[in-house]
Amino acid sequence: MDYSKYTYEQLLKKVVELDMLNRELLREREQETRLDYSWAGNLGHWYWNIKSNSVVFNPLKVTVLGYSMEELPREVNYQYFTERLHPDDYQGTMDAMLLHMHGKKTVYEAEYRIQAKDGSWKWFYDRGKITQRDEKGAPLFATGIVFDITRNKERELNLERRSKDLERDARTDPLTGIGNRRAIIGELEDRLVEASINRTPISVIMLDIDHFKVLNDTKGHLFGDSVLKEIATIIRNNLRGLDTVGRYGGEEFLVVLPNTAEDNAASVAERIRRKVEDFDFGEGSRVTISAGVGESPGGEDIETLIDLADKRLYEAKRTGRNVVIASRNGEP
């Protein structure tokens, strides 16, 4: 570096900085505490003179970001890197450093993204430690090592996304796009726990397509599939944000309505029944549904509640179909 244009004060400052850096390097050598690791992605050491806010580092950290050393300012400070942190990683990284500086963590350790010259984001794992403090314990000097973990992080994130996709697929009915039996039962279990804790009612609706086997036999399975999809959409479009529908069986749907008394749930079921009855499914077919409604005041288990709604659905079928059965007076 050309120091010929430095003022006396700047040169004196630089001498102090270099002295601190040299003492740090000697300390590492003498105590054999160098932070060398053979791990892949090792970009080398960094040294931060906290008092002068100057950073000395291996050029690899900036070259991996697409910069050359000539593009850097003459004096690189701590903010040169922190200003390029991803917004989602900034506060966590700052907190990690502050906790260590204040003695609340034995080391500084963070994973973060820095924006490269081309606009992309590179992932780094950074680990360091305050190695020099003044007589009052204030930090003077820190040293650390940084790794490029972009490839590993991308693989990790891809695996997480794939895992979430697989989990979603495992809980989704492939034909209708709504939750399958596993998903809707899980939802009901969770909502029953909430209802028990909060002492609020919860209701379920069991819906079944009337004469669906006849529909399949006369119109074909493709038409039957289209009816299932349309009815799933009708049900979903007539629910609140808190409510959930799932395909319980072949042509059966289960609706979970948290914080809903039975009379209100019956009104929802009746609205859905009318929407299905009025919908044009094509090919001159009239499609209807029957429904049974059950309420838990917060104490019933899942089997009891589903069994109640199922028995009322059976009663709706027995009494002529295309009807909703709900009653507060015990079994229908």
Image (cartoon, rainbow, N blue to C red):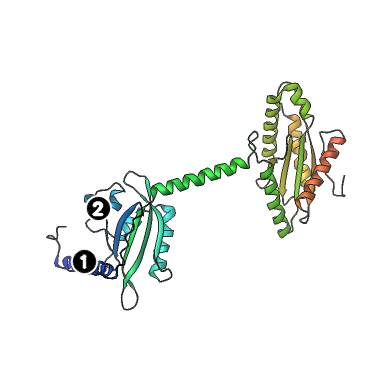
In depth, the one of 38 and 194 nearer the eye is 38
Q: Secondary structure at mark 2?
A: loop
| Distance from Cα at disc 2 to Cα at disc 1 | 19 Å
Q: Quadrant of residue 53?
A: bottom left
Q: Is residue 223 above or below residue 81?
A: above
Q: Earlier in the sequence, mark 2 or mark 1?
A: 1
Say whether residue 325 is visible: no
* Quadrant occupied by the C terminus: top right
* Quadrant occupied by the N terminus: bottom left
Q: Residue at x 15, y 62 (%)?
A: 6
Residue that label 2 marks? 72
Q: Residue at x 72, y 40 (%)?
A: 248
Q: Residue at x 37, y 58 (%)?
A: 126
Side of 45 where 287 appears, left or right: right
Q: Amino acid at mark 2?
A: Leu
Side of 158 where 249 appears, left or right: right
Q: Amino acid at mark 1?
A: Leu
Q: Quadrant of residue 310?
A: top right
In depth, the one of 111 and 116 nearer the eye is 111
Q: Residue 255: where, in percent of width, then height?
A: 72, 43
Eye-nearest disc, 2 or 1: 1
Q: Is residue 228 above or below residue 50?
A: above
Q: Residue 70: where, in percent of width, then height?
A: 21, 50
Which label sits on residue 166?
A: none
Q: Residue 171: where, in percent of width, then height?
A: 63, 42
Q: Residue 258: where, in percent of width, then height?
A: 71, 50
**Local crowd size for mark 1, using a 10 Å CA cut-off: few (<14), some (14–19), many (≥20):** some
Residue that label 1 marks? 18
Q: Is residue 210 above or below residue 258?
A: above
Q: Secondary structure at mark 1?
A: helix
